[in-house]
Every structure is written in structure tokens, then in C-alpha cells.
Image (cartoon, helix red, strand yellow):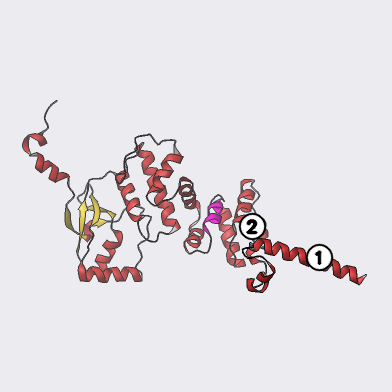
Amino acid sequence: MLTSLDSLFTTQEQRDEAKRDSVQDIPISQISDFPEHPFKVKQDEAMLEMAESVRQYGVLVPGLVRQLEDGSYQMVSGHRRKLASELAGRDTIPCIVRDLTDDEAVIIMVDSNLQRERVLPSEKAFAYKMKLDAMRRQGQRTDLTSTPVVEKLKGKDALSSAIVGKTSGDSYEQVRRFIRLTNLIPEILDMVDDGRIAFRPAVELSYLAEQEQCALYDTMGREDCTPSLAQAIKMKAFSRDGKLTDAVILSIMEEEKPNQKEQFRIPKERISKYFKPGTPARTMEDTIIKALDYYRKRQREMER
């Protein structure tokens, strides 16, 4: 086996040093954002606080970039630190420069951002999809942040999806649900991020065609309502059969939801003396209903 030129003209120590990550101050103007970055970087109050921190103390945790063919850099991890540095009036940002393939960069970008305290459903949805697609292209697990899994992943969606969600603690099924959200139109996906539509109904709505989703969005706006899980499942069934018309959507959305029915409650302390300590609430409710049925029956007998 021939000795490489690198081995002939450098020492082992020099070669090891070259492999180590080193921090460099890189001009912000030379760093582009990651393509289709799924995590939102907002100039909100938290960002202004970060910018003030950077102004006073600098960037304490370096970003991670990779160098492109034209000599410029691409941000892999550190988009919020980059914006905070710009707002703080800094021209450079400390970064680790690492040689990464496209798919390796995607995996690291997703995993590093999923560690944030709050991640929106839409951010997880597109991040999981990007990471899963990258792993499928690789053909096998090459996640640089975890122990490699040699088994081929092509066609093994359950295994690959479980690996995708491992970083944030989501199961295979939950990862699959999040990825379904990428099929929602932006207007409905925004409602999921805002908490106006719950996660599980949103997953069911993702099976509706784009035109059907647009019709539903218009109906929600006119009627000032959002679908429950049961309503979303019903619309999905009608859509599957090709029968989800505007009229059907309106009819389903006009149905009374269980949580919209008027509730009649009795304070527990008023009825607890009639039951043994520890009696389940459902048992109390059933007993009261039976007692009322008996009372009504006796009333009718007396009226005869």
C-alpha cells in the first residue's frame, strides 16, 4: 500500500490537529443561511435580549459553518446568534468550520435546533422531513451526534423515523404525524403553530386535498370555529371518498362539539356526604342520575 503525500510531509500530531475543530472569527457578510432552514429566526423580544447580551459579552458559543466551493460559508448551527450579532453591530462571529456533506449538514442542523426550549409544530414537521430525506439519501445511518447504526434504512420507515425523533424524544409514530403536517396549506399550519388548531386534528386535516383545505380555511373564518378531532376524521373520510364538498364541510363544522354543550356542575363538597370517601366522580354521577330517574318515576306515579 503506497504512503500518501500527507503522511510523508506531515507529522501525526499535525494531522491530528488538522482534524480538530478550531474556532475562527468569520465576517458575517460571508455567511449565508442554510437552504430552506425550517426553524424561524424572529426579531422578537427574546432576540433583542440576545443581541444586548452579544453586545456586552460577545458570542459565548461559536456557530457551526461549512465552507462552500466559492470560498464563502454556510451557517449550519447558529442562525439566531448570527442575527443577534448583526443587531449588536458586530462584523464577525466566532464559528467552527467543519467539512460536511449536504446530508451531514442537514442532520446536524436539525439535531442542534431541536434542542431549543420551544420548537413550533411547523418547525419540527419540516425539520423531521429534511432529516429523514437526508438519511434515506445516505442509505444508512451516519448521524454524527450518535452511535452509528449500520443497518440499511431504505424502505425501513419505522426504524429511520424512530432514529429521526430520538434526539427530541419523539416516537416513530409521532415523527410520522409531524411530517404529515408538511402537507397542510400555510394558513392552516400557522393556526397549528398559534395553538388555534390542536395537533391531532391537524394531522387528520393533512390528508385533505389543497382545494379542500382552502375551502375549510374559508369556512373556519366565516363561522369563527375550528374542527375537533372527530370532525377532522369525518372530513378525512369524506375526502377519501371524493365527497368533501363546501356544503359538506359547512355541515360538519356546524355540528355541536362535546365541549360546546352546556355543562351543569355541582360542587363536590355539596354531595360528598352522600357517598363513601374515595368514591369515583363517575360513580357519583351515575348514582345521581339513577336517583333522579327514580324521583321522576315516583312523581309521575303520584300525578296519576
Relative image position of residue 73 (x, y in whole percent): 23, 53
Q: Residue at 27% of width from left, 69% of height from top?
A: 51
Q: Quadrant of the N terminus?
A: top left
Q: Of the numbered discs in the image, which one, if any, rests on residue 249?
A: 2
Q: Which residues are magenta?
A: 197-209
Q: Nearer the viewer, residue 31 or 162?
A: 162
| Residue 257 visible from this viewpoint | no
| Residue 199 visible from this viewpoint | yes
Whether residue 200 appears in magenta in the rendering, the answer is yes
- Residue at the disc numbered 1: 294
Q: Nearer the viewer, residue 46 or 295?
A: 295
Measure the alpha-carbon separation of dots 2 and 1: 42 Å
Specify whether 52 is left or right of 281: left
Q: Tell me which corner region of the image, top left, top right, bottom left or bottom right, holds residue 104.
A: top left
Q: Amino acid at mark 2?
A: Ile
Relative image position of residue 42 (x, y in whole percent): 36, 65
First in sequence, mark 2 or 1: give its number: 2
